[in-house]
Image (cartoon, rainbow, N blue to C red):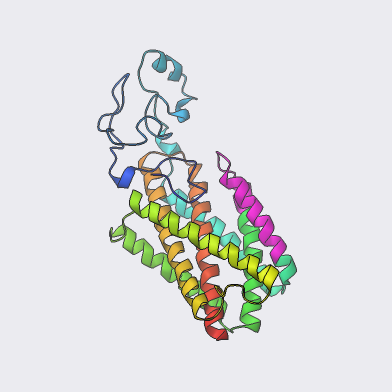
Amino acid sequence: MRSSNPVFSRRGFSRDNGTAGYGAAPQAGGPAVGTQGNPYAGGNPYAQAPTNPYAQNNPYAQQDLQHGAPQAPVATGDKMTMDDVVMRTGMTLGLVIAGATVAWVMNVNLGIAIGAALIAMVLGLVQSFKRKANPALILAYAAFEGVFLGAISNYINTYVAEGAAMQAVLGTMAVFVTMLVLYKTRIVRVTQRFTRFLMIAATAFLVLTAVNLLFMVFGGGDGLGFRSGPLGIVFGIVGILLGAFFLALDFKQVEDGIAYGAPRQESWLAAFGLTMTLVWIYLEMLRLISILNSD
């Protein structure tokens, strides 16, 4: 099952409902034992199978392939670990916080903030469609995203609701911890049906957001009212819930990547995906708090 997160959607290291037979020793010249029903049995880029692209540097790879034997797996020291993901995520979130702090202290105006947001969006899209992680690109995205978040948070905190930024930070942390507990205890299970419904809901959410924005630009006012009043509150809660469910998808992608023996470089993509989701949740939380305090 592929993630709906654009960072992971091109990677393909998910297990189907977390039950696929990963880690089974493959037979020479044939598929791995226990891979029946595994959608990645023949194409999983991290499986120890003849198609493993990470065995290309192995001097015996071609010889093994010619004799029908599987290529050698990625060296254990080069595989992604949870420590790698935590460290990279700490770096990206640290840059987001640093950029936000600078923007807040320097009282960056909204014009610069919008420019930083556009740059971050472009960098994010470029990285999302690259086949390999680019640490410099990811860190640059985090820095510009931080500038945008700092400026918009300072504006809302000053002119809309004092203390809104801290409330949004605490709310985002609460959502993260809650979803992590729900995922680890398997109360929330990431299945194909879960992902399908989440994608439908997210698509509808984004379409309504875009339509509302168009009405605001060409019709003026609050558009269709999705960002103000009671309807705005409901819309904000839905946005936070969607972000929380996307966190569950991110957790599963990290778990599956480690299980499949993804190369260490993939930990940058895991950090990038988690950072994008947390930024989404924070913005929706900040928007909801501003609506609650303006009514």
Query: From this viewpoint, is residue 88 visible?
Result: no
Image quadrant in which the C terminus is located: bottom right
Q: Identify the residue shown where x is 27% and y is 44%.
A: 19
Q: Identify the residue shown where x is 49% and y is 80%.
A: 230
**Quarter of the figure with residue 62:** top left
Task: Give percent across and percent down for residue 79.
Answer: 43, 39
Task: Give percent across and percent down for residue 60.
Answer: 43, 18
Horizontal side of 248 relative to 214 (left or right) equals left
Q: Is residue 182 magenta?
A: no
Q: Which range is magenta? A: 114-139
Judging depth in this view, the residue of 105 and 293 nearest the camera is: 293
Task: Give percent across and percent down for residue 77.
Answer: 43, 38
Q: Is residue 132 magenta?
A: yes
Relative to 114, residue 25 above or below: above
**Quarter of the figure with residue 1:** top left
Horizontal side of 120 relative to 16 (left or right) equals right
Query: From this viewpoint, is residue 253 visible?
Result: yes
Q: Residue furthest left?
A: 34
Q: Identify the residue shown where x is 48% and y is 46%.
A: 8
